[in-house]
Amino acid sequence: MAASPPPLAFPWQSFLEELEEGIVCINAEGQVVLWNNRARQLCRPDQDKKDLPSMLQAILKENFFPATLVLNGIKIAVSRLDSEDQTWLILKEVTDKTSTAEEGRLLLQTVIDSLSDAVSVVDENGMGLMINRAYTRLTGMTEEQVLGQPANVDIAEGESVHYQVLKTGKPIKGVPMKVGPYRRDVVVSCAPVIINGKLKGSVGVIHDISEIRRLMDELARTRRLVRHLESRYTFEDIIGRSARLLETVERARLAARTPVSVLLRGECGTGKELFAHAIHHASERAEKPLIRVNCASLTDTLLESELFGYTEGAFTGAKKGGRKGYFEEAHQGTLFLDEIGSMSLEAQARLLRVLQEGEIVRVGESRARAVDVRIIAATNADLEELMQQGLFRKDLYYRLNVFPIHLPPLREIPEDIPLLADYFIHRYGQEYGRLAVAAAPSVYKRLQQYDWPGNMRELQNVISRALINLGRDQSVIKEEHLLIPFAAAPKPKGEGITYSGGSLKQLQQAWEKELIEQVLMQCGGNKTEAARRLQISLRSLYNKLERYRSGD
């Protein structure tokens, strides 16, 4: 509902009443606060209801200005002027006395203002004649800065297409340039305006491609980042100062400078993947892909298609156009074969052939494709024991074991445990919103006493759980927060151990067999869960069970 304006709200209201144009003022809340006499005549508002007519409300809502419409049988041209907190509508009756040119201009302006693309019109001399609202939004330039000015006034980089069209009389499409004070990336297309066979000007349509350019730059940046993340760990990311670990890192640095195959040996959770990334990152192949393959997950039926790829129609369900295998994806880069000891003998034979010949054959294809791949393999299995049992090929072992690197378990580098614990406290503290958390000195001592069968991975979990167990008002991790499995204080050396004969290897196997049987009993015979708890692959668990059943 319109509110009656206070007497002194518009001291020059008497002046507005004398105008031939209708004037309507609308406040920030959308209420009409002023009508002059001509506006009341044109709109004829009801005495009790002084809202704008529905047609005028519609163009105001959609911001279609200038516009022409018919109110109460009268043709009216409507313009809009915005001040800081008010909107002014100027209503002008279009009569027979109104020039056809002026009415046509109003109609043309209304049409181009309805377009979403920016439009610019110049006359035969290249002077600005007309622009639309989309143009103003895109370039950041006003009518005062453009109309009556040379056609190149808005160009920040490039040449005026308007001038080229006026010179040749021919349309020009898709010219890239930068416009306006913000140097927006655009593509401009212009066409000549021909009236009665004479060139009267040029009309240009300007497409904003700044967002497309931004997305393309972001995509390129993401691709570079993804390539970098393929080797996201470096030697600087390896935490520890113990002599044993520093010797291992130095050996890995030496391996990175050579093109030979590397075999990373170590228990679960000792950081084999971390070392693989660091070696690749420090090698001459750092800018090429690093592809990780979990050998335990490759069944014999999937092996060929996953490692070597396939052609279209090679088998039921084959992807249209075929697919590259891991070897082709890693061409000129590094292929990281994790859990290499879990490969079946058939898979080992196929892998050996590729390593020897340096070429692969896609499934469903006859021609060989050369591949240049550096191999880094990793395993927690006893490959020498597997060779004796006939479960791992000797020729593949010697092909992979050119540069072996043994990663120390956590229990052999206890001096590094406080450093690692602090790192995980900081890392997970950021994730969990516990930034000011520290550990009590007794915590470090207890962590160093523990045996860590899961190594770094288990330490991560223990620190993560400790932060979760920490009360909201607590900022110091104590021993009760650790919840380390079997965390009773260790017995003094020599106590509780009775030697009853047998080699160290035999004793280790007996202990391992008993441990696996105990875990299987706890899991109700579920081998998948038992393998998960023991942090070994399912294939490795089956191999061990088969070995124990045969009595070897």
Image: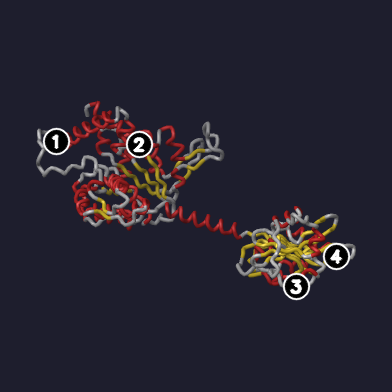
CA–CA distance between discs 1 and 3? 100 Å
Q: Nearer the viewer, residue 103 or 508?
A: 103
91 to the left or right of 218: right
For marks 3 and 2 on the same chain, the one whose residue lies earlier in the sequence: 3
> Residue 148, labelled with which disc?
3
33 to the left or right of 184: right
Mark 1 vs mark 3: give the one in front: 3
Q: Nearer the viewer, residue 65 or 220?
A: 65
Q: Nearer the viewer, residue 285 or 459?
A: 459
Q: Nearer the viewer, residue 88 or 231?
A: 88
For marks 2 and 1 on the same chain, the one whose residue lies earlier in the sequence: 2
Above or below 272: residue 532: above
375 to the left or right of 381: right
Residue found at the far right of this picture: 96
Q: Position of residue 177 (x, y in %)?
A: 64, 65
Residue kind at label 2, given as amino acid type: Met
For marks 1 and 3 on the same chain, the one whose residue lies earlier in the sequence: 3
Residue under label 1, please give it. Answer: 503
Residue under label 4, please give it. Answer: 101
Q: Quadrant of the N terminus?
A: bottom right
